Amino acid sequence: MGSKRRDNWGSRLGVIMAVAGSAIGLGNFLRFPAKAASNGGGAFMIPYFISLLLLGIPLMWIEWTLGRYGGGFEHGTAPGIFHSVWQKNRFIKYFGVIGIFGPLVIFIYYTYIESWTLAYSVFSLAGKYVNLADQASMQGFLRGFQGLEHNQYFNGIGPAYLFFLLTFAVNTCVIYYGIKGGIERLCKWAMPLLFIFGLLLLFRVFTLGTPDSARPEWNILNGFGFLWNPDFSALKSAKVWLEAAGQIFFTLSVGIGVILTYASYLSKGDDVVLSGLTASSTNEMTEVILGGSIIIPAAFVFFGPVDIQSIARSGVFNLGFVTMPLVLNKLPLAQILGFIWFFLLFLAGITSSVSLAQPAVAFLEDEFDINRKKAVIIFGAVCFLLCQPAIFFLGNGVVDELDFWGGTFFLVLFATIETILFAWVFGMEKAWDEIHRGADMRVPRIYKFIIKYITPLFLLFILGMWLWQEWLPIIFMKNVSPQSKPFILGTRLGLLFIFVTLGVLVKIAWGRKRAQLERAR
Ligand code: PFF
């Protein structure tokens, strides 16, 4: 061991851009506005910011610190990192499997959705949907594209598949070039471009004014009012609090393992306190200011206070791929604006999806001593196969199922495990020193208390509440239609298979290492 040198980041700005790139994704521009609008508007920001302070920020610091610590032992993924923290425990490495499994599962569907944004940015420039002016036809366009129906716009899934291949190839290519040469290089130009595109759209939305003088109340100020006027009665619902916590996890990319992997490429003395905080703040600014100012206020101006209610609840895909194109179609330079919107989403998507791919690749490199090129080829081949059900069985709820397990269930479970490991097994005193190694600023002391008691209790509480209120019906497939049941069951068996396979790989890797150590003696 120790013969090969692990990859590393080229600069501090580079790693911050990469982590911010992972955090800023489709979640910021689609998921956040949809959640805020349907969960109390401005009032949603209360549980949202409480979750940010008590869960998001602490988890960010925990993951940056644990990742850097594990990297010192040449481990870039949770099995090895957890094992380094708790060497006496033989089982803890298997809990770490979630940190490879979760990102892999999200990657499978996230990349497919990301490919739609690339496709739509091309369609927009080519004027393929510019004449569509109502919900029904735009919806038909989307369903035709997704292969859910044959219609006048599309007669098969061919174009969607082509864009998927392209997106998949670009992702694999970035990973192939490594941390500094691929991911960091991508994020360094994609992130500034993303901000420029976001600001352009923000400016366009702010200057919408009152497009229809016959309906003066359909104006942009009321559009912002719709999203931000607080409905405090929403705070009485446990669901609103859970949704806010879920959004914080998803948007910051914490609780899943990708930050562990990114941080493992830091050096021992690199600051994590300020860097972690900077990456999180960049994400929050983008989410609340850009994400919260584009889609919902713009849709309000054109659809009015009544229809916006159902639009906000119509789900993330509808908002992004149906409502927003319709809104932009009503403006001058519609084709360019449409391109800017979808390419913005594509940039946000790709800088997130590469972070989801990296843990699996790092696992093969670190634990099996495979070189990066070979690791990427294995990852690419396996992942390509795994993506197929998400593409072809989209209509049967496969994507939602993957999102539940990868993007919700295991996320909270993993966050709980790593927090307890950090604060209680590693020990808060040692953890506090480790956080501050090379740090450019001190973490406020209150966080010692928060990380030790509040974060784990909050997580256990959420885990329990979710199980009780929402997960039991999902786990027992209460709301699944009979014709979708076999697909959901198939997806679950597939996920179980992936999980067990990863567990077996961990066992094999540790067995090999033990044998190597014994031979060396
Ligand atoms: N944070 C990303 C978003 O907001 O779209 C999604 C994501 C990326 C979640 C990476 C989890 C992750 F590990």
Image: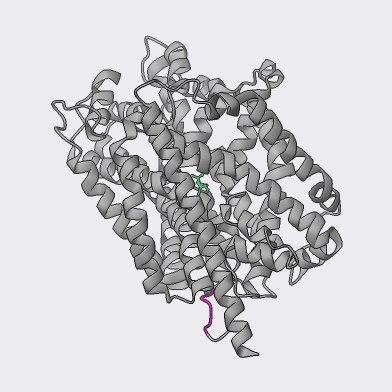
Quarter of the image where the N terminus is located = bottom right
The answer, for residue 210, to whether it is visible in the render is no
Q: Position of residue 324 (x, y in %)?
A: 36, 30
The residue closer to the viewer here, 195 or 252, is 252
Q: Quadrant of residue 71?
A: bottom right
In the drawing, does residue 234 fall left or right of residue 26? right
The residue closer to the viewer here, 107 or 498, is 498
Q: Which residues are magenta?
A: 4-9
Residue at x-position 50% and y-position 67%: 362
Q: Position of residue 321 (x, y in %)?
A: 34, 32
Q: Quadrant of residue 152?
A: top left
Question: As displayed, is residue 297 above or below residue 269?
Answer: above
Residue at x-position 66% and y-position 57%: 63
Q: Quadrant of residue 328?
A: top left
The secondary structure that most of the magenta stretch takes on is loop
The residue closer to the viewer here, 337 or 380, is 380
Q: Position of residue 124 (x, y in %)?
A: 24, 39
